[in-house]
Image: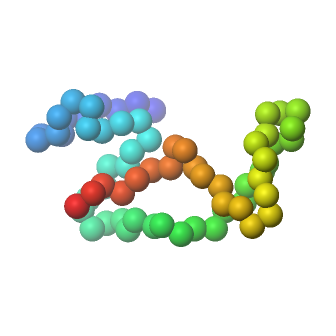
Amino acid sequence: MNVGLLLHGAEAGEAGRGQVLAAPGSIAVRTVFAADIALLSEEEGAAEVRTGGSLTFTDAPRAPER
């Protein structure tokens, strides 16, 4: 499903694919979460992950700066 929105006061390019449109105060930003992940094998192009290391999610959504 595709939708088009006219957001008064927003400049072109301020909203992007994958962003959430919600009423102010209706959702909360989370900085910690639990997840089940599947790691790729070396044949599939995996990067090295060491025990105790942390993963970086390059396309993770960011909270707007206030």
* Front-lying residue, 7 or 40: 40
Image quadrant of residue 15?
Answer: top left
Residue 8, horizontal then vertical, whole percent: 12, 40
Image quadrant where one finds the C terminus: bottom left
Residue 32, horizontal then vertical, whole percent: 53, 69
Please tell me which residue is depicted at 58% across the width and 49% down the height of the picture. 57
Please tell me which residue is depicted at 39% across the width and 45% down the height of the picture. 19
* Front-lying residue, 11 or 50: 50
Residue 10, horizontal then vertical, whole percent: 17, 39
Lateral position of residue 20 relative to residue 45, left or right: left
Lateral position of residue 35 relative to residue 32, left or right: right
Residue 30, horizontal then vertical, whole percent: 46, 67
Lateral position of residue 20 relative to residue 40, left or right: left
Count the numbered circles shown.
0
Please tell me which residue is depicted at 44% across the width and 41% down the height of the picture. 18
User: How is the model colour-coded?
Assistant: rainbow
